[in-house]
Image: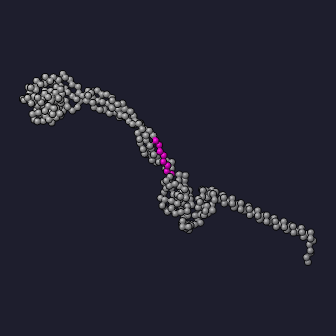
């Protein structure tokens, strides 16, 4: 049989029951909060020990800041039965990227190595990329990046002058004269150096220009032979003497007139005449022609007159002495 509770007693029981319910609710809420904090901490620790994630990891997997090799392996094993995961007609694959700092693993949304480069924000002009950009990518493909840098340097170089000698027939053999002093030149050179990952692989000259021209040293060297008049027979400059000899060896007035006139035209009756060039002596023979007609001493005026008469008689005067023969005729 039930015993009715006193109103005051009932009120006390009701208040106690309410306190117990409130305590349970507070405990449950606290437990939920603690569980959330613990799980959040574990997740943050799980993804915070590796590399930076790509935009595709954030979009597809919900990763926010960092990812790890474990995270990547987990994702890979999730699709281990398929080589690639196709989304919107494109591929998501995991590739390895190697540069001077090491190897990283990247989750790439695309189909070619060009997509890898695009995703990583790489300027193709600054790198050597292998394999080619058109190469289709697959899981664990290794993409190598070699940073290319070029530098230019301009240097100056001294260009030494050369010494030149110029023959001068107006100067005697054994004498010389510096007519122009030498001066070194200055050349500006541009050098291109190419570096791969900081190591120089090529150095070449791309431009050269003279800043200061080279001035060569010029020295005149005498070629005129000195004549020892005491050792040369028939060496004088007396027209009277040579005219007398011509009168003895000629047989006609035309021969005498031609020899005397050409002798005066060619050498002024001087058997030692030498302009320092090819022709020498009383009738200005070349040594080759003189020797060809049996001459032995080109300074011997008697020999020159006899050989000249032989040439005149053979009709070769105009060929051997063209200028003076025209004047005589």
Q: Is residue 89 left or right of residue 7?
A: left
Q: Residue at x 14, y 28 (%)?
A: 261
Magenta segment main secondary structure: strand
Q: Is residue 256 above or below residue 60?
A: above
Residue 321 lies in quadrant:
top left
Residue at the extreme bottom of the image, as rendered: 1
Does residue 183 show up? yes
Which residue is at 60% across, 56% downward?
52
Decide if residue 218 is on the left or right side of residue 26: left
Identify which residue, 53 or 216, lies in the foreground.
216
Judged left or right of residue 36, residue 271 is left
Q: Is residue 321 visible?
A: no
Residue 193 screen position, x and y as percent? 46, 46
Q: Residue at x 63, y 56 (%)?
A: 49
| Viewer-closest of 320 and 65 | 320
The residue that appears at 56% across and 59% down in the rendered structure is 106
Residue 323, located in which quarter of the rendered image? top left
Tell me: 259 left or right of 1.
left
Q: Can residue 63 be found in the magenta stretch?
A: no
**Start-end of magenta stretch:** 147-154
Outermost residue toward the top in this view: 230
281 versus 104 height, above or below? above
* Residue 322, picture quadrant: top left
Q: Quadrant of the N terminus?
A: bottom right
Percent position of residue 142, x then y? 51, 58
- Badge count: 0
Question: Which x, y percent locates residue 307?
Answer: 12, 31
Q: Quadrant of the C terminus?
A: top left
Q: In the current view of this chain or complex, which residue is farthest to the left? A: 251
Q: Nearer the viewer, residue 213 or 240?
A: 240
Relative to 301, is 35 above or below? below
Name the foreground residue: 329 vs 18. Answer: 329
């Amino acid at each position: 049989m039930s015993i009715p509770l006193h109103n005051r007693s009932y009120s006390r029981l009701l208040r106690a029951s309410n306190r117990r319910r409130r305590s349970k609710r507070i405990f449950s809420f606290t437990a939920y909060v603690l569980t959330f904090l613990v799980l959040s901490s574990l997740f943050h620790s799980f993804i915070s020990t590796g590399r930076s994630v790509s935009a595709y990891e954030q979009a597809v997997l919900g990763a926010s800041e960092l990812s790890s090799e474990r995270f990547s392996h987990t994702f890979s094993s999730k699709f281990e039965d398929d080589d690639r995961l196709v989304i919107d007609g494109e591929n998501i694959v995991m590739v390895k990227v190697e540069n001077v700092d090491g190897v990283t693993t990247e989750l790439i949304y695309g189909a070619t190595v060009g997509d890898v480069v695009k995703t990583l924000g790489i300027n193709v002009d600054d790198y050597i990329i292998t394999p080619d950009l058109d190469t289709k990518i697959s899981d664990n493909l290794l993409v190598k990046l070699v940073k290319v840098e070029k530098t230019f340097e301009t240097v100056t170089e001294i260009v030494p002058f050369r010494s030149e000698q110029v023959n001068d027939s107006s100067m005697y053999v054994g004498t010389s004269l510096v007519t122009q002093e030498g001066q070194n030149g200055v050349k500006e050179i541009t050098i291109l150096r190419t570096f791969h990952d900081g190591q120089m692989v090529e150095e070449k000259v791309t431009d050269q220009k003279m800043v200061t021209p080279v001035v060569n040293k010029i020295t005149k060297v005498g070629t005129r032979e000195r004549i020892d008049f005491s050792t040369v027979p028939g060496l004088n400059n007396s027209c009277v003497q040579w005219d007398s000899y011509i009168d003895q060896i000629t047989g006609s007035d035309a021969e005498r007139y031609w020899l005397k006139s050409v002798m005066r035209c060619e050498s002024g009756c001087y058997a030692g005449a030498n302009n320092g060039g090819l022709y020498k002596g009383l009738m200005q023979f070349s040594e080759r022609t003189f020797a060809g007609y049996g001459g032995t001493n080109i300074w011997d005026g008697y020999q020159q007159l006899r050989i000249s008469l032989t040439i005149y008689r053979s009709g070769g005067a105009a060929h051997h002495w063209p200028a003076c023969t025209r004047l005589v005729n």
